[in-house]
Amino acid sequence: MKLKKKDIFFQTLENMADTIVQAADYFAQHVANLQDVLLFANEMKKFESQCDEFTHTIITELNKTFITPLERDDIMDLTTSMDDVMDGLEACASRFDMYHLPNSDEYIVQFAEILRQSAYEIQKAIHLLSQKKLLAIREYTIRLNDLENQGDDLLRICIKELFAKVSDPIELIKRKEIYERLETTTDKCEDVANLLESIIMSNS
């Protein structure tokens, strides 16, 4: 029996979610022990470029497909939101090279772990979306909201510590921006969760 070909939109969203997981895994593994900052930034750029290609695929398919499996705006918004997560990870990685930061710290490592876990929750949710198991997605959107709250708490802690312990203003500016970019990326993960919640409500 011939297997039914997966819908191009769902397949591309799954590919995108899988790439975000690969990127978040790579980020978390390497930011904890930075040895080659330029290589780290370049590898993250490759993941980001791959997600850009998936976004382009979605746009191309939307422009030529009359009937889509979800509302066109939902597909586009979800694609854009997932791409924002990838952009956030890549932007953080690039800062280590741009700012000549040879190492991370315990807070960056903790943010990386929050983002790694968030990426896996997004991946699970997107694969369920492809299977049209909408109500089952809620478990992962709730988890994404919780992880974003952890990011908020961590930002408050690390900014407080930064101003208490770092006296070099240049170092302070560099670290503060990276912390804030990492926290903003956890917000982007929550944006994906909120869009999924909206899709569940519209299609249940």
Image (cartoon, rainbow, N blue to C red):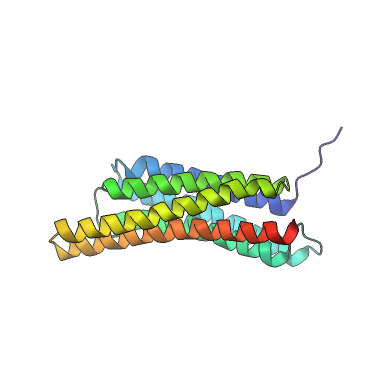
Point out the residue furthest to the top here: 1
- Residue that appears at 54% across and 51% down: 142
Q: Quadrant of the N terminus?
A: top right
Q: Can residue 181 be seen in this view?
A: yes
In this image, 39 relative to 57: left or right? left
**Count of marks placed on residues:** 0
Find residue 38 and report its horizontal and vertical position in percent.
Answer: 33, 50
In front: 175, or 63? 175
In this image, 167 relative to 133: left or right? left
Find residue 13 and report its horizontal and vertical position in percent.
Answer: 64, 52
Residue 64 position (above or below residue 150): below
Point out the residue furthest to the right here: 1
- Residue that appears at 43% across and 55% down: 149
Residue 198 position (above or below residue 111): below
Find residue 3 and report its horizontal and vertical position in percent.
Answer: 81, 37
Residue 51 position (above or below residue 34): below
